[in-house]
Image (cartoon, rainbow, N blue to C red):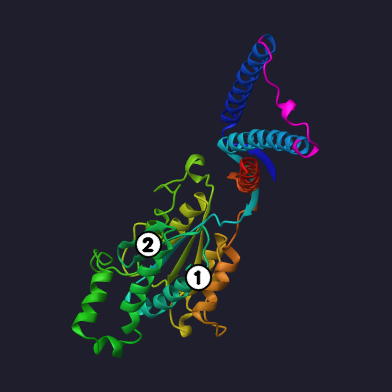
């Protein structure tokens, strides 16, 4: 720890004041001494201290008096030092992630149960986040931002809990058929804004572009060198079955080209049934993701959605290198203790001198 001062000028000013007071005191004392010498001597204390005992007590009194003066000077110096705020330079290591994550979920009917598992997994992961920013966007024929990119983990947890609760009753068509009107309305409200284009569903390319637009540095249509350069790693977790119905503004390949130019990684989670994993649409989805350096995962090997999400996180969770951060920290402890001890000793001497 390196000692330094927040207000060094205060210490300097205090020293100047102390020296000025000491100088004036010495000057006045010297003047009085000169006056005493020049005046007629009519009385000497030594004349009354002829006994050995009285002489010893007088010498003791002078020693204690001088010691008391010295202690007062030391106390004044310590008080002046405290006014200058003694500090130390505290160096510590801080690790913080510099990653932005956007959950991009296809909310067409068949994908909702899968979406809930993804949401539940990220709800658990949020508790261990340190510096990551996360956002959630859902899409069908159009997109809706559930919550923007943020590191307010309390808000994120609240929104993910709400989404999980709403989607709890859509595990199967039977669950939907038996759903109460209030629960159905809650789902309808949550999905509002995702089906604004008629006769179209799962417009995945458009959904990816909308998710990418939540990340800093993304520009619709192109990505120049200016907006492609980013200080934080950015990734999109795309969960969909890749079954497109209707004509999108952007195909998946076009959307992935834009995200690649903006240095945004897109990882894919196949949310369709296992028997569809060998379909042509699924293989195209896999090829498109991997061709743009993303991770594509399915449940074909028996892995749970939670384990798939955590695998993506383990691959993408890049932390900043540890950086040393220095800070000025007030350190009055020893100075205050020393001042307290000096004052206590001075009070004891003052009490002894008054006896």
Tag 1 residue: 125
Q: Examine the image and state in which quarter residue 113 appears.
A: bottom left
Image x and y of residue 35, in percent? 64, 11
- Is residue 197 at least partly visible in the picture? yes
Image x and y of residue 156, in percent? 40, 65
Q: Are marks 1 and 2 in contact (CB under 8 Å)?
A: no
Mark 1, secondary structure of its residue: helix
Q: In terms of depth relative to the viewer, which is nearer, 20 or 65?
A: 65
Tag shown at residue 207 = 2
Q: CA distance from mark 1 to mark 2?
A: 24 Å
| Residue at the spot 74% in from the left edge and 26% down from the top edge | 47
Mark 2, secondary structure of its residue: helix
Tag shown at residue 202 = none
Q: Is residue 69 left or right of residue 270?
A: right
| Residue at the spot 34% in from the left edge and 82% down from the top edge | 168
Image x and y of residue 343, in percent? 61, 43
Q: Is residue 72 left or right of residue 151?
A: right
Find out whether residue 201 is within the magenta segment.
no
- Is residue 297 at least partly visible in the picture? no
Q: Which residues are magenta?
A: 39-54
* 220 in relation to 82, above or below: below
Q: In terms of depth relative to the viewer, which is nearer, 213 or 83?
A: 83
| Residue at the spot 24% in from the left edge and 67% down from the top edge | 192
Q: Examine the image and state in which quarter residue 143 appears.
A: bottom left
Which one is earlier in the sequence, the residue at label 1 or at label 2? 1
Q: In terms of depth relative to the viewer, which is nearer, 53 or 15?
A: 53
């Amino acid at each position: 720890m390196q000692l330094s001062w927040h207000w060094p000028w205060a210490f300097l000013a205090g020293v100047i004041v102390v020296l000025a007071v000491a100088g004036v005191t010495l000057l006045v004392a010297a003047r009085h001494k000169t006056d005493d010498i020049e005046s007629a001597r009519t009385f000497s204390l030594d004349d009354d201290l002829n006994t050995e005992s009285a002489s010893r007590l007088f010498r003791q009194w002078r020693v204690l008096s001088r010691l008391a003066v010295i202690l007062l000077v030391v106390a004044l110096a310590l008080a002046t030092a405290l006014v200058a705020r003694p500090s130390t330079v505290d160096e510590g290591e801080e690790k913080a992630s510099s990653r932005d994550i956007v959950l991009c979920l296809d909310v067409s009917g068949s994908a909702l149960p899968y979406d809930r598992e993804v949401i539940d997994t990220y709800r658990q992961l949020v508790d261990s986040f340190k510096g990551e920013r996360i956002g959630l966007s859902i899409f069908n024929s159009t997109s809706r931002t559930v919550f923007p990119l943020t590191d307010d983990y309390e808000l994120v947890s609240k929104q993910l809990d709400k989404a999980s609760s709403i989607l709890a009753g859509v595990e199967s068509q039977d669950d939907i058929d038996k759903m109460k009107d209030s629960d159905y309305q809650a789902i309808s409200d949550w999905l509002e804004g995702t089906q604004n284009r008629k006769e179209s569903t799962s417009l995945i390319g458009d959904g990816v572009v909308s998710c990418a637009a939540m990340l800093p540095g993304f520009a619709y249509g192109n990505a120049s060198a200016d907006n492609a350069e980013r200080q934080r790693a950015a990734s999109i977790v795309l969960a969909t079955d890749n079954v497109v119905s209707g004509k999108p503004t952007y195909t998946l390949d076009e959307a992935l080209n834009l995200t690649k130019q903006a240095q945004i990684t897109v990882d894919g989670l196949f949310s369709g049934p296992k028997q569809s994993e060998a379909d042509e649409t699924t293989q195209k989805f896999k090829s498109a993701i991997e061709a743009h350096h993303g991770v594509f995962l399915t449940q074909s090997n028996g892995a749970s959605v939670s384990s798939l999400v955590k695998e993506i996180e383990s691959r993408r969770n890049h932390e900043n290198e540890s950086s040393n951060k220095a800070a000025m920290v007030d350190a009055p402890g020893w100075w205050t203790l020393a001042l307290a001890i000096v004052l206590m000793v001075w009070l004891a001497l003052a009490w002894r001198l008054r006896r």
